[in-house]
Structures are given as structure tokens and as C-alpha cells.
């Protein structure tokens, strides 16, 4: 049978990449290629999902995506994850890494080499704003709506805008198999959040990028823009972040106040380095106001949403076993880079911790 494969990748634009995609029609016979049959999973509608390794690489014009020059423009898409596309018949999304014409990982490929160790868990809180004609949904043409306060987790015509888009996005993500764990209206009118969880840096980050793809495609038909700028509206309005919750086997099973404080201290030492990949224009959001710490400071505290790192009260009450929340990443940040920075810090601290306690 012929199926639609939507190859999805990240381009070379800076400071943040854009999502690109194109459709390949491919003959897929689930009864052939027996070596892949044990690896194939079943979609929610009972159809077998192709395995990335059985799908062909595909070239594209890198000179049109800021990933190559015109005289050597071929770049290669290499499939790494496949999920069902619920909005199209016999269709799948194919997330790809980008390689150059010589088969080397492209400099814009932040996924290549990322740890796949599934003892490290990541949960991203993706905030975004829905814009229409340059204004958040629900904002009057001139001026602003009522001050924020009633909109967070709001219900009712005067408290939320864009719920039809949010519900459609939630359902599509669920039916595709992405590990979306929740949604809620945020503090500003027209601002929303959804959560993605994954075991391992790549699993969580892959699902977040694919969920962003679905969101952008869904809003096309509504004539609405998905705005990921961390401070889309000036003034007394919350910005948008991509808070990252993270843990490891050691944090969840052994824990201890010393371990958690040491991880936080190490993150503080690397603050100036890590913040550089936590999203552009983040200084307009990280001001010390609106549930943020200033970008030039680093703090951590229990149940403190004004800190750089929040230690959840549940972690403390559970004998210091659980997770931490990094509140610094902006809504436009690349989850591959955020997860990579956090993973390297946890790994370093845990190696030293195990040596000391051995």
C-alpha cells in the first residue's frame, strides 16, 4: 500500500531553528522485511508503524534552509522517529536528523550524540501564545484586556481564548502516540501550556519538536500564529517559558538533601554558559518579576517559582527523593540543547557523588 511520510527536520536559521517538512509517498508492505517486524509498533487505530531504519534517507536543498551553499546544496534527512499522523489518511510523521552530503552530522544537528540513557527523565512545560493579526487571542485591537489573574487555568468565555485549537492539538498528539501529559490555560489571555514527558534526552525532546510541528500545522487553518517569543507582550504580563523538570535513578531512588543541593550548586556554576542556549531574548522574560529570577542571577529554593531552580515541595516531603525544575529555559529554546546541558551536569555530580559515598 502507498503511505504518506512527512519528513520533519530543523533548519539552519539562528538564533532558533524553524521546523521544515515535505511529503514522500512510499510503498509499505508490513509483511515484507521480516527483520523489522518485531520492531514495529501498533498505532492507536491498529496500523503498524514503520521503523526508522527501514525508511529511506532523503535529500533536500540546504541552500534554501541556511544549511548549505548553492554550489554544494544537498543535505540528507535520516529518519530517527516515526509516529502516526492522525490528520491524514495512511500517513506518518518522520522526524529526521540532518547530515551533510558526505554523511557527517550537520553543524545544526543538535540531536546527534545526545544521550539515550533512559534513567534520566525529562518533562518539558511548553508555553506559547496564540496570535491573530499581531495580538494575542482575546486582546482588543487597541489596548489590553483586564489584568492577568483570572486567566490561569480559567474557564469561560471571558477567561480563555483558543481552547478549540488547544483541544484539537491535545487529541492529535494523543492519537499520534506522543507522550503529552496535560494542558492548561496560562497566566496571560491567549497563552497556553502543554507538558511532554520522556525517558531519556532524545525521547522527550523528539516528542516536543513533533508536538510543535502539529501545533503549527493545526493553527494554519485558523489563521493563527504560534508565538514562542519569551516576552511577546510588554508590560505587566507573564512571559513564556519551557520549564524543564528532570530526574535520574539516583535522584528518585536514593536522593538526599546533599545530592539535590550539590546538583543545584553545579548548575549555578554553569549558569552563564548554559543560559546562552536557553533561548534568545530570554533577558526580556527573566527579569526577577512574573515568577522568574533575573537572568544575571542564579538561585534555588523549595517551592520557589521566583528562583532559577525550583525544588518541588513533594521532593522534600518524599525524603528528598524526586525531581528538580529548571525554570530558566525560554519557550523558544531547543529541547535538545537544554536536555544536553542538564544531563551533563547531573552525570558529573552523580559520578563524584558515587565516588565519595562508595
Image (cartoon, rainbow, N blue to C red):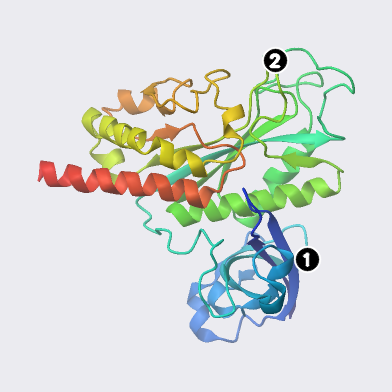
Q: Secondary structure at mark 1?
A: loop
| Residue 30 sits in quarter | bottom right
Give percent across and percent down for residue 119.
34, 51
CA distance separating discs 1 and 2? 40 Å
Using the image as rendered, state which of residue 184 and residue 69 is in the foreground.
69
Q: Depth-wise, is mark 1 or mark 2 nearer the camera?
A: 2
Residue 164 is drawn in which quadrant? Answer: top right
Residue density around tag 1, few if under 14, some if 14–19, many if 20 or more, within 10 Å: few
Residue beneath disc 1: 89
Residue 189, above or below 267: above
Quick one: which residue is furthest to the left in this view?
358
Q: Position of residue 100 (x, y in %)?
A: 58, 74
Q: Can I make out residue 51 in this image? A: no
Return the disc, 1 or 2, that comes first in the chain's sequence.
Answer: 1
Q: Which residue is drawn at the image coordinates 50% and 52% (left, top)?
A: 336
Residue that carries the numbered disc 2 in the rendered image = 150
Q: Which residue: 57% across, 44% down? A: 333
Which residue lies most toward the right here?
141
Asked whether, in this view, residue 47 is left or right of residue 130, the answer is left
Q: Residues within 10 Å of mark 2 (few under 14, many from 20)?
A: some
Percent position of residue 332, x then y: 62, 42
- Label 2: state its secondary structure: loop
The x and y percentages for residue 352 are 19, 45
Relative horizontal placement of residue 191, taking residue 306 as reference (left or right): right
Amino acid at each position: 500500500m502507498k503511505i504518506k511520510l512527512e519528513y520533519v527536520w530543523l533548519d539552519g536559521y539562528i538564533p532558533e531553528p524553524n521546523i521544515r517538512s515535505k511529503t514522500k509517498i512510499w510503498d509499505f508492505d508490513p509483511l515484507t522485511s521480516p527483520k523489522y517486524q518485531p520492531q514495529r509498533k501498533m498505532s492507536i487505530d491498529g496500523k503498524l508503524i514503520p521503523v526508522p531504519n527501514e525508511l529511506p534517507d532523503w535529500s533536500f536543498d540546504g541552500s534554501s534552509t541556511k544549511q548549505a551553499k548553492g554550489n554544494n546544496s544537498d543535505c540528507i534527512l535520516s529518519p530517527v522517529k516515526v509516529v502516526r499522523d492522525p490528520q491524514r489518511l495512511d500517513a506518518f510523521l518522520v522526524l529526521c536528523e540532518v547530515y551533510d552530503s558526505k554523511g557527517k552530522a550537520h553543524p545544526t544537528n543538535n540531536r546527534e550524540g545526545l544521550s539515550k540513557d533512559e534513567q534520566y527523565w525529562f518533562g518539558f512545560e511548553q508555553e506559547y501564545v496564540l496570535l491573530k493579526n499581531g495580538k494575542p487571542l482575546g486582546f482588543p485591537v487597541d489596548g489590553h484586556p483586564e489584568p492577568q489573574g483570572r486567566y490561569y487555568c480559567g474557564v469561560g468565555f471571558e477567561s480563555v481564548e483558543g481552547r478549540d485549537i488547544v483541544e484539537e492539538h491535545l487529541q492529535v498528539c494523543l492519537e499520534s502516540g506522543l507522550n503529552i501529559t496535560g494542558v492548561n490555560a496560562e497566566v496571560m489571555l491567549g497563552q497556553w501550556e502543554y507538558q511532554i514527558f520522556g525517558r531519556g534526552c532524545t525521547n522527550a525532546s523528539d516528542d516536543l519538536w513533533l508536538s510543535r510541528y502539529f501545533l503549527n500545522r493545526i493553527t494554519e487553518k485558523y489563521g493563527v500564529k504560534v508565538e514562542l517569543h519569551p516576552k511577546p507582550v510588554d508590560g505587566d504580563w507573564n512571559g513564556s517559558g519551557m520549564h524543564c523538570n528532570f530526574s535520574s535513578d539516583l535522584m528518585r531512588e536514593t536522593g538526599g538533601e546533599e545530592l539535590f543541593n550539590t546538583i543545584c550548586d553545579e548548575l549555578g556554576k554553569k549558569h552563564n554558559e548554559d543560559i546562552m542556549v536557553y533561548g534568545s531574548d530570554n533577558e526580556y522574560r527573566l527579569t526577577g518579576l512574573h515568577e522568574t529570577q533575573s537572568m544575571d542571577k542564579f538561585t534555588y529554593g523549595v517551592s520557589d517559582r521566583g528562583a532559577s531552580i525550583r525544588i518541588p515541595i513533594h521532593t522534600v516531603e518524599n525524603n528528598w527523593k524526586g525531581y528538580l525544575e529548571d525554570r530558566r529555559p525560554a519557550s523558544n529554546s531547543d529541547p535538545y540543547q537544554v536536555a544536553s546541558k542538564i544531563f551533563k551536569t547531573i552525570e558529573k555530580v552523580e559520578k563524584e557523588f558515587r565516588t565519595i559515598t562508595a
